[in-house]
Amino acid sequence: MKNTGIARQLDSVGRITLPKELRKAFGFSEREILEIYTEEDKIILKKHSEPADIFTGSTKDLIEFEGKLVSKDSIKKMAKLTGLI
């Protein structure tokens, strides 16, 4: 983990402001949606990415299988390739 030397105080409702230098360095745009994770005593911020098909990147009609997202269209194409349909 890299120490930035930056410290911020929480406001009365628990907010902090990410310094402009960090927002610029990580390419965060105005009103960017960030995902929040925790790990032990750490809070981790990550750019939000829409769930998508692992093969095509499609975000429509997704089904989770073995921890991965696959679209119905990809499933149909794979079924045709294997001769199931």
Image: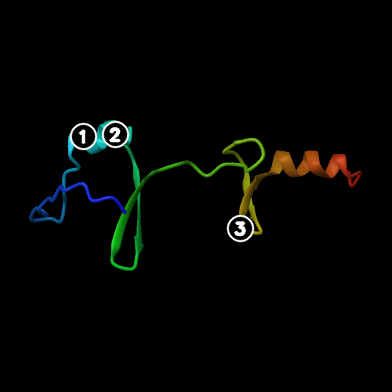
Tell me which residue sits at (23%, 51%) in the image. 3
Binning the other alpha carbons within 10 Å of mark 1 as few (below 14), some (14 to 19) or many (20 upward) gives: few
> Residue 47 shows which numbered tag?
none
- Decide: few, some or many residues near mark 3? Use Cα within 10 Å; few <14, some 14-19, many ≥20: few
Is disc 2 placed on a helix, strand or loop? helix
Mark 1 or 3 closer to N-term?
Answer: 1
Give the residue number, with chain letter if any, for mark 2.
25
Q: Is residue 36 above or below residue 40?
A: above
Q: Residue at x 40, y 43 (%)?
A: 48
| Disc nearer the start of the sequence (3/2) | 2
Which quadrant, please, contains the N terminus? bottom left
The answer to whether mark 3 and mark 2 are in CB contact below 8 A is: no
Callout 3: SS = loop
Q: Give the image location of residue 36, x and y in percent.
A: 34, 53
**What mark, if any, has residue 21 been given in the picture?**
1
Q: Pointer 2: residues within 10 angstroms few (<14), some, or many (20+)?
A: few
* Residue pointed to by mark 3: 67
Q: Among all residues in the image, which is located at the extreme right?
A: 83
- Which residue is at 29% across, 58% downward? 43
Residue 32 placement: quadrant: top left
Q: Quadrant of the C terminus?
A: top right
Q: Could you say where residue 29 lies in the image, as x and y percent from the top left?
A: 30, 31
At label 2, which amino acid type do we have?
Answer: Ala
Q: Secondary structure at mark 1?
A: helix
- Specify the quadrant of the image occupied by residue 83: top right
Q: At x 25% / y 36%, what residue is drawn?
A: 23
Give the distance between the C-alpha atoms of the residues marked 2 and 1, in whole angstroms.
6 Å
Which of the two discs, 3 and 2, sits closer to the camera? 2
Image position of 30 with respect to 72: above or below? above
